[in-house]
Image (cartoon, grey):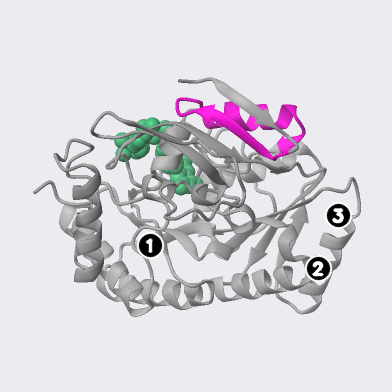
Amino acid sequence: MTAIREIDPAGDFLVCEAGCVLEDVQNAADEVGRLFPLSLGAQGSCRIGGNISTNAGGVNVLRYGMMRDLVLGLEVVLPDGRIWNGLRSLKKDNTGYDLKQLFIGGEGTLGIVTAASLKLVARPAEKVTLWLGVASPAVAVELYTLFRTRLGELISSFELIAGLGVDAAVEHLPGVRAPIEGSHDWHLLIELAWSFDEGLLERAEAVIEEAFEREMIADGTIAQSGDQAANMWRIREGQSEATRNIGNIVRSDVSVRTSDIPDLVDAVDRFVRSEAGDVRILPFGHVGDGNLHFNFLLPFDNDSPERHKLLLNRLYDELDRRGGSISAEHGIGRMKQAAMMSRKSEVELDLMRRLKAAIDPDNIMNPGVILPAD
Ligand SMILES: Cc1cc2nc3c(=O)[nH]c(=O)nc-3n(C[C@H](O)[C@H](O)[C@H](O)COP(=O)(O)OP(=O)(O)OC[C@H]3O[C@@H](n4cnc5c(N)ncnc54)[C@H](O)[C@@H]3O)c2cc1C
């Protein structure tokens, strides 16, 4: 189940089996001068079947979309034992219901994905990685708007990290260095890329200069080597690992409209300060996608399941007020089932139950995942 069955740089696709490790697929695309753009911290171990079934996101969603946007076709073993061969590699195919979408993000509840045809994109030639210190999420969103206006689709990643999380990474991750000096409440890690060999660096510098002139950034730097860029990414990817050294973490994975991020962060910070004074907020995530891993930091000696529940419930209330999502890229599983059930309309839940019953009437595929088992 780990074979790459076909790779076609002219058609910009690759057909692989579901057991392929994501990094192996990225490498196979690279060998033919293409990019498979799904990129996330677990890429050395997670597998394509899991990426499809969780509709994984990661750091390049802004430019290339989630796994759903990268799948052209699927081969699936159905609960009744039949094999559905939907392994088409077509960019255009309007022949009725798009059945593959049911299995992408289906968390293994409708069938077992055995192979997939995946979209490849042009491999960037020049890449520019920047690190900026900013005063607030509001400024981060303003900067995102500026970069979007000036550089459009050349932005691959636009990641916000709380200063507390950056400090934790510098202190606790071996070999990690602070990209800029001084203390900053918030940081941005931005990656730009295009297919030409040169010229992007100068364009990036012009935007940074404009941001400095408009007093949007306190400090910033551009990675001068692959090593410096890797150090910046280590801080971002190592947030979970680093912050567990400074307290107990309550994790979440939420989304709102990008323009609502500053207001969400302010509102959550306010209730934490008024109702749980020893808790700190520790969000990081994908500004352009409106997706924050909105984590809370609790003291080691004042932690309890009740506190976790209170913090998540209050966060979810704030999401509800803004039409946000309680699960941006990590799915529902069992842990978020109650929160999902209480938020979806009866019509939506009814459609979901009917789909499940139609494809898996005996409820043998991951029972109790997404929808309750009975
Ligand atoms: C360090 C780290 C960083 C991460 N960063 C991100 C991130 O930035 N963005 C993001 O979206 N996610 C992220 N994740 C989560 C990651 O997306 C998922 O763990 C991964 O996509 C799942 O792949 P897996 O092989 O680990 O699947 P598993 O964990 O084995 O399975 C995940 C689900 O898919 C089902 N499944 C697995 N294979 C199949 C199959 N062949 N057919 C049907 N169902 C199947 C399983 O039953 C299960 O419900 C991260 C995880 C880690 C550990």
Which quarter holds ligand 1? top left
- Asked whether residue 86 appears in the rendered view, the answer is yes
Residue at image location 36% in from the left, 76% down from the top: 270
Residue at image location 45% in from the left, 55% down from the top: 96
Compared across the picture, whether 9 is left or right of 355 comes to right
The residue closer to the viewer here, 343 or 10, is 10
N-term-proximal mark, 3 vs 2: 3
Mark 1: give few (<14), some (14-19) or many (20+) Cα within 10 Å: some
N-term-proximal mark, 1 vs 2: 2
Task: Indicate the position of residue 305 as horizontal and vertical percent values.
Answer: 17, 53
**Helix or strand or loop: what does disc 1 sit on?**
strand
Q: Quadrant of residue 147?
A: bottom right
Q: CA distance from mark 3 to mark 1?
A: 37 Å
- Asked whether residue 241 appears in the rendered view, the answer is no
Q: Which residue is mark 2?
A: 207
The quadrant of the picture occupied by the N terminus is top left
The residue closer to the viewer here, 319 or 307, is 319
